[in-house]
Image (cartoon, rainbow, N blue to C red):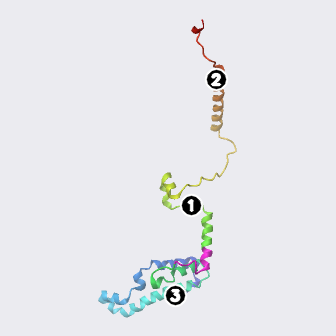
Amino acid sequence: LCFHGLSSAVKLKLLLGTLHLPRRTVDETPAVRSALCPFYSFLHAVLRHSNEWMKGALMEIIQLASLDSDPWVLMVADILKSFPDTGSLNLELEEQNPNVQDILGELREKVGECEASAMLPLECQYLNKNALTTLAGPLTPPVKHFQLKRKPKSATLRAELLQKSTETAQQLKRSAGVPFHAKGRG
């Protein structure tokens, strides 16, 4: 088997591809097949060895992967080591393998570097603001990427208008005295 000559990505795809094999392909017995159709009774001898061969080939691939130098291939091989026999995954890895601790540390660093909003599911971009804060919690404000060197013309015009209006209001207050009635004086 030329497993060691493959790249790490191909090894991982091959290992993870075993999860997509129909379970009956891996462990269905030929006796069940021969009872289903008379045609299979003819192929009983051939098929009896094919299922054993399939399970044996999967076990051999997983065994070769467990001897690999890539930590990701090692971890996936550890997860899949009980799959051909039992159909279940080995998820008790942290106590058994120090390699898993290193990989989890790498993943924690990568997740720590990413912005929280980048880690949200893709459907979150279609939610309104209230639903998004309910689902993901309060979002961080966007980062200011640049600062304008001078204020825009509209901002300066607005500031001038506000200043003139406050000056005008103050002048009106000063010039306006207490009103008095001329008829009441005399």
Q: Residue at x 58, y 9 (%)?
A: 184
Eye-nearest disc, 1 or 2: 2
Q: Position of residue 76 (x, y in %)?
A: 54, 78
Labels 3 and 1: the sequence-earlier one? 3
Q: Is 4 one of the magenta-colored residues?
A: no
Q: Give residue 66's quadrant in the image.
A: bottom right
Instruction: Work out whether residue 98 or residue 154 is closer to the camera in this orientation and state it.
Output: 98
Secondary structure of the residue carrying numbered label 2: helix
Asked if 149 appears above or below 38 in the picture, the reply is: above
Secondary structure of the residue carrying numbered label 1: helix
Residue reaching furthest to the bottom: 45
Residue reaching furthest to the right: 149
| Mark number, residue 173 | 2
What is the three-letter code of the residue carrying label 1?
A: Ala
Q: Is residue 33 left or right of residue 56?
A: left
Q: Residue at x 66, y 27 (%)?
A: 167
Q: Position of residue 112 (x, y in %)?
A: 62, 64
Asked if 73 appears above or below 30 in the picture, the reply is: above
Local packing at callout 2 (Cα closer than 10 Å; few below 14, some 14-19, many 20+) is: few
Residue at image mark 3: 60
Instruction: Work out whether residue 135 or residue 107 is closer to the camera in this orientation and state it.
Output: 135
Residue at image mark 1: 118
Asked if 68 appears above or below 129 in the picture, the reply is: below
Give, as a single range, the part of the protein colored magenta. 91-103
Q: Residue at x 63, y 35 (%)?
A: 158
Q: Position of residue 151 (x, y in %)?
A: 67, 41
Q: Give residue 37's quadrant in the image.
A: bottom left
Local packing at callout 3 (Cα closer than 10 Å; few below 14, some 14-19, many 20+) is: few
Secondary structure of the residue carrying numbered label 3: helix
Residue reaching furthest to the top: 186
